[in-house]
Each structure stands twice: as structure tokens, then as C-alpha cells.
Image (tube, rainbow, N blue to C red):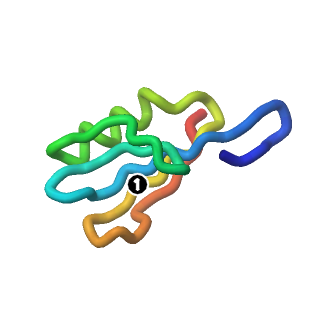
Amino acid sequence: MSWVSGGTVTEYHVSPAANQWQVKKKGGSVVSNHRKKRPARERAHEEASSGDRIVVHRQDGTIQESTEKS
């Protein structure tokens, strides 16, 4: 989590794990597991609150995109 004026920002990472895609809060808490990347991205957006950051990784682990939920 990061601090911003008025509160904290939680980062949600969508990343490959074994033969699935995982949504994790930064720091290690697993939110959900999915067979496909798209449902994992959708879940990350559902979990995130306004101002939170969503980081989507490629299959090789590199960052594909990083966005802030508005």
C-alpha cells in the first residue's frame, strides 16, 4: 500500500501463477485465481476502490499496463 492525501492506495496485481492467472494485493494476499487473464483483470477492477492501482503483467511477468481506478 502507498499513502496519498486522504488515505491509502492498494495495488492489485494480475499475474501468471502456475497454469492460471492470479489477482493479488501487493504484499501477498491472494484475492482470486482464474483460468484466463480477462476474468482476472475484471476481478481486479471489481476489487479496487477509487484511487487504487491495478497492475497487469504479461505471461513472462513483465508489466503490460498499470492504471489507477477512477
Where is residue 62 shown, x and y percent of the image?
39, 71
Name the quarter where the C terminus is drawn: top right
- Mark 1, Cα crowd under 10 Å, few <14 / some 14-19 / many 20+, is many
Where is residue 3 shown, x and y percent of the image?
77, 44
Residue 6 falls left or right of residue 58: right
Which residue is situated farthest in the right direction here? 5
Q: Amino acid at mark 1?
A: Val
The residue identified by callout 1 is 56
Residue drawn at 19 percent across, 51 percent down = 20
Where is residue 18 shown, x and y percent of the image?
19, 59
Q: What is the count of numbered marks?
A: 1
- Viewer-side residue, 17 vs 42: 17
Residue 49 falls left or right of residue 5: left
Helix, strand or loop at mark 1: strand
Which residue is situated farthest in the front direction here? 28
Quarter of the image for residue 65 reads: bottom left
Image vertical order of residue 28 relative to residue 32, above or below? below
Residue drawn at 34 percent across, 42 percent down = 41
Residue drawn at 56 percent across, 37 percent down = 69
Residue 66 falls left or right of residue 8: left
Quarter of the image for residue 45 reads: top left
Residue drawn at 21 percent across, 41 percent down = 34
Where is residue 32 shown, x and y percent of the image?
31, 36
Image vertical order of residue 48 relative to residue 29, above or below? above
Image vertical order of residue 63 relative to residue 46, above or below? below
